[in-house]
Amino acid sequence: MKRSLSGSKSKEMIMDSENSGSKETTSVVIIGGGVTGLALATFLKKENVDCVVLERRDRPYIEMRQRAGVVDARAVRMFEQWGLADKLLAGPLAQTIEYRLNGMPRVFKASIDDGISSRFCTQQMLVNNLLHELFDEMSGDVRFNITEINIENGTGDRPRIIYKDDKGVHELICDHIAGCDADRGISRASIPQDALTAYSYDFGYAWLAALVEAPVTGHPIMAISDHGFVGQLPRGPQRSRYYLQCTLDDGPEDWPEERIWEEIRLRSGDDTIRNVQVHNIEFVPFRSVVYAPMQYRNLYLAGDAAHLVPPVSAKGMNLGLFDVDVLGRALLLAVKNGDRTGLDNYSDTVLPHVWNYQDFAVWMADTMHDAGNPALHGNFRQMTARARLNNLFESPTAAQLHTEYQRGTN
């Protein structure tokens, strides 16, 4: 499925020995049709900036792809400022978390002083809403089923993107490239290795993520026990996803459905939980990575192409949305006013925010897992982690800081 270019873009047909294709110009090429790429394209399209999104999957695949997600309060405010919140955001408010220690629940409620709440709006839901708004309502240019992409971002005046689809080989000449194609995409791989520094940390464990046919009936749960961690978060009105701490070597053969439910009951301290249908399971290694700088010549990295955080902090999608908020405004200044200040300072602007929430992700991961099974890091780390968790309910200062991180406003 593909939309043709219009407006100020020019087109001429080119031929090679085997395929016909097009040669076009546009202001911005966005590589990747996930949340970050589609959000950036929607921002730019709303401001009448020409852009093309290249996505290797087809539309049904990316609409059905299951991903977790909480849109934090900062991102909600961002969508409001772009005039898109009412069209894009749905799902229940995300103001509370039940932290459970050996079966004993304590509910943490984020204080709100600006009237804006975080939302349980999954990436799948947000991708569907973005595609509908950008592609169906605004006639945005999103090209699916791209099989090959080559980025030429050298010393020439304008970058070139050569890509292939079922119609042939095509060339896009542009002013700017946004790399929003996740951790293993072509965008970051096109940057010379000596131009980037990778900062990485492996936590040494993983999560089993199980999508099940059962709603969250109360508050979202993050349960810590002597047997390990389990969490439950909503994934629509009838489904939820359980997350169980496991080893890096675990696979599906180690976790038959009966064991999944036994461990959920054991770790949550709730014998009333019954077995229901498990739709799928995934294994997610806990890993943090930051690539710096987040730009090279006329290519700008955003989202998972530039950084990864473990899912316990619920900040992966929100960091990507922060990136494209900053990048979108910088691109508007460059395209409309010829002012490159925002683009030149893009990496320096977003990296402090990225590192701040990497620190929050480490705090959440260490607290939720060290406080559980002492076999992980010993009894001393277990007890200090439980003390940190207790502070959220005993110290207004600790509670306020936790609130700011949860809401994305720190």
Image (cartoon, rainbow, N blue to C red):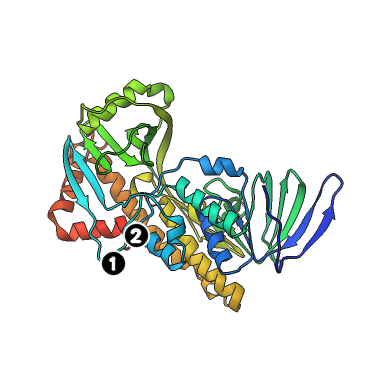
Identify the residue position indicated by label 2 in the image: 73
- Residue name at image x 53 percent, y 75 percent: 341
Q: Answer with the quarter of the image where residue 281 lies.
A: top left
Local SS, label 1 = loop
From the top left corner, tell me how far across and down residue 143 is, in percent: 65, 51
Residue 375 visible? The answer is no
Labelled pair 1, 2 in contact (Cβ < 8 Å): yes
Q: Answer with the quarter of the image where residue 76 lies.
A: bottom left
Residue 357 visible? The answer is yes
- Residue name at image x 55 percent, y 66 percent: 46
Residue 117, placed above or below residue 128: below
Mark number, residue 41: none
- Residue name at image x 57 percent, y 41 percent: 60
Q: Answer with the quarter of the image where residue 256 lies.
A: top left
The crowding category of the residue bearing disc 2, from other C-alpha atoms within 10 Å (few below 14, some 14 to 19, many at least 20), is many
Instruction: Inspect the image, locate mark 2, and give the three-letter code of the amino acid beneath it.
Output: Ala
Mark number, residue 114: 1
From the top left corner, tell me how far across and down residue 45 is, in percent: 58, 64
- Residue name at image x 85 percent, y 44 percent: 18
- Mark 1 vs 2, N-terminal side: 2
